[in-house]
Amino acid sequence: MAKNNTPAAAPKADIDFENELWNAANELRGAVAENQYKDYVLSLLFLKHLSERFEIRKQEIEQSFADPKSDYYSIEKHQQTEVLEDELEYQVKNVYRLPKEATWEYLRENAEQDDIKVKVDQAFVLIDEILSKRNPDYKGVLEPIFVKSQLSPTQVAGLINLFSKEKFSEINNPESDIYGRVYEYYIGKFAMAEGSGAGQFFTPGSVVRLLVEMLEPLKGRIMDLACGSGGMFVQSLKFLQAHGGDKNDISIYGQERYEGTLRLCKMNLLLRNLSFDVKLGDSLLQDRFPDLKADYALMNPPFNISNWHPELLPDNDPRLFGAKDTFTTPGNANYMWFQTLWHHLSERGTAGVVMANGAMTTGSAGEKNVREHMIQQGMVDCIVQMPDKLFLTTGIPACIFILSKNRDGRDGEHRERKNEILFIDARKLGTMASRRLRVFEDADVARIADTYHTWRNIGGSYTDTEGFCKAATLTEVAANNYVLSPGRYVGSEAEEDDGVPFEEKMKLLTTELAAQFEESALLEKRIRENLEGIGFGL
């Protein structure tokens, strides 16, 4: 398959667009805790999205009454009413028919009323009932939270009026993915505001893009068992669309431990009109998809979870590579994530996992046992060590593990590589977007992903690059005590030769050093003289 080497970047909102949104958020601080603010803003945005999609479909139906090519051309008035009220006419376009009290227009018209908080909550209840009627798993996506909040009616009206502007309308901007852009912007900003507490629902966009570009999920079942707000799924959709794929060719499965975060995920996926199956629960101890076999797994699980209670696992848990006491440790759950993912991969499945750097080298018995087993059995395809400051939500250095059951070269697209592991040291890549945050630029993502693809693909032109990448044999890895740190294998990047002979360099350095010694002696003499002058001689 021909590869498009340009990563599928998300549309970028202009600066004025972003500043206006965040300034609006700042105005509401004090009334709602920062870690809850997203619930109010994103819920309103979600309602507006459903409402506009409903209005668009309603207009399409109304126009069909005057279209000679339509089955509804020139039907009687009462029949038109029946068609407009038929839920199936909306469901066929993945749209929900809403009562007037649940529409954005109704809230906008009543925004200045003293009871606007009541009206918003009532709209949420109505929509939640409509969603759950079509799919019981959607129950609880919208909760009535405005009445019990400390937000004033004026503040709520301010939010409604802001999002009523034409620039935030899908009807007026049908190609802009306006709600998706606003939604992603706010999730990122809320992650910055919440700091470490936001890690369960946010993975930096450039890291998500890198994972998706490496795995190329164009068709099949996509899984994330720590799905947070659904960023891996959304980026997979963008990749699919950028490469001319059909979203009907992918199926989405996710699990998330936190109920509030799962609501964000469901809203995010519904915004994109994606079909999905995401469930609530602890993926390590409560596997809600025991029979799922995924073609792609993309995950950023919580790092280094201790006291995760492996003793609660059944002794015959099918995910374990062997005896529970040998392949688990209560001190860290990192390698239980790997075993869980491997169990859920299809016969040709591949997983990309963001993991703490310590997983590459840990000597803890349970973890090292799993790592050695994975290497010996040819499960590890690629390791990417990433630079620091990529994550606002944690200071722990991170890497990417690519695990694959598709290493035998039998699919006609990828070569046989069971006895190799590709190591990529990307610590020098990325650009500082601020003092706290580094991001991968398009060129960085392309360099890493292309390196992996040229190594993995049949006919690829891969070559080792000193200081950046190395295809090491399993024998080499075993000789390094099964340590997976890329720096152990890729070597040091060669420094450019400035053309100055060593003898000349050494002569110059010696002269400079002698001058520095002389200056140091003079400074010491002056300090002693000054101290003696005030009666404190050494």
Image (cartoon, helix red, strand yellow):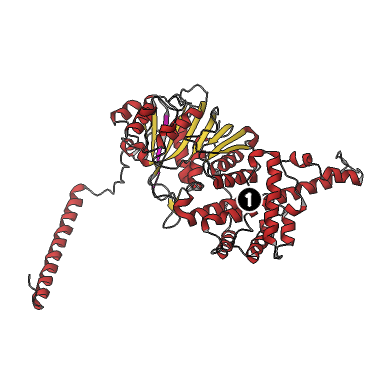
Q: Residue at x 10, y 69 (%)?
A: 525
Residue 421 position in % (x across, y down): 39, 30
**In the displayed structure, would residue 123 be above or below residue 327?**
below
The part of the image, by quadrant, that contains residue 307 is top left
Q: Quadrant of the N terminus?
A: top right
- Of residue 55 and residue 248, the one placed in the foreground of this image is 55
Q: Residue 534: percent from the left, percent from the top?
A: 10, 78
Give x and y (percent) for residue 82.
Answer: 85, 43
- At horizontal 20% and vertical 47% (from top left) the residue drawn is 502
Residue type at numbered disc 1 = Glu
Describe residue 493's horizontal placement relative to residue 206 as left or right: left
Left or right: 333 as drawn, with respect to 212: left
Which SS type dominates the magenta stretch? Answer: strand
Q: Position of residue 207 (x, y in %)?
A: 47, 44
One can see residue 89 in this view: yes
In the structure shown, which secondary structural element does the residue marked by tag 1 occupy?
Answer: loop
Which residue has dot 1 on it? 143
Residue sitting at x 55%, y 60%: 32
Compared to residue 271, the image places residue 459 above or below, namely above
Q: Residue at x 30, y 41 (%)?
A: 492
- Other residues around mark 1 within 10 Å, as few (<14) / some (14–19) / many (≥20): some
